[in-house]
Image (spheres, rainbow, N blue to C red):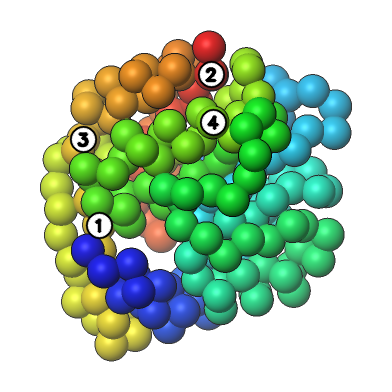
Amino acid sequence: MDRNRVRRAWDAVAEAYAANRRADGEDAALLAELLAELPAEPTVLDVGCGDGARTLANLPAGSVGLDLSRRGLELARERRPDARLLQADMTAVPLGEDTVDAVTAYHAVFHVPRAEHPAVYREFARVLRPGGYLLATVGTAEYETTRPDWFGSGHPMFFSTPGREATLEQLRDAGFEVVWERSVEDPLGSSALFVLARLS
């Protein structure tokens, strides 16, 4: 998987993708449950924040948005000028250890090859403070594919997941305890599995 191809695809579809996302909906409502578990004035890292229309838009002031796409981050800056935005790969988060209270990763991790997912979850654990939380989308089945002409952009998009059971095992290996799993309606019209996990 070529990271630059994924970045170019996200740059190309940023506006179209944003137009199909909402700041409300079942998946966005999960953030209220996450925030209820966190201390006052938490620092939240939103991985794969994109234009910021859903997760970042519903997170506290001072949250951190991370994305591979420069165009996505430009849109996020317009929406959340108070956020700290980072253009980076989620396999190497440019934050120190124990610096955030929670990590959100909506529809993000499965754009990384599944062989690298354990490294991603270890990175999330590294930047989380002890007892911190991860709220993430999890693939329900094992697959690896490239969808051509994604969102009519002329660019392919890469998807990869080891499936639910393998992901839960990877989370446990990274030091997380799963609090709950929940399938909710995604704004693009399909069901998605979300996991809330707590760092031991």
Residue pictured at 33% horizontal, 67% vertical: 3
Seen at 85% across and 33% down, the residue is 41
* Percent x, y of residue 52: 63, 61
Mark 2 and mark 3 in contact? Answer it, CB < 8 Å.
no
Q: Which mark is residue 163?
A: 3
Disc 1 to disc 2, C-alpha distance: 26 Å
x and y percentages locating residue 152 in the rendered image: 31, 84
Looking at the image, which residue sits at the far front? Answer: 96
Q: Label 4's element? A: helix
Residue corresponding to mark 1 = 159
Mark 1 and mark 2 lie on one chain; the one further toward the N terminus is 1
| Residue at numbered disc 2 | 199
- Going from the N terminus, do you reach mark 3 or mark 4 first? 4
Please report whichever mark, 4 or 1, sits nearer to the chain's N-terminal start: 4
- Say what secondary structure mark 3 lies in: loop
CA gap, disc 2 to disc 3? Answer: 21 Å
At x 51%, y 35%, the residue is 124
Is disc 4 in contact with disc 2, using a CB cutoff of under 8 Å?
no
Residue 163 location (% of width, % of height) = 21, 35
* Cα gap from disc 3 to disc 4, whole angstroms: 23 Å
Residue with the mark numbered 4:
126
Q: Is residue 164 above or below residue 59?
A: above
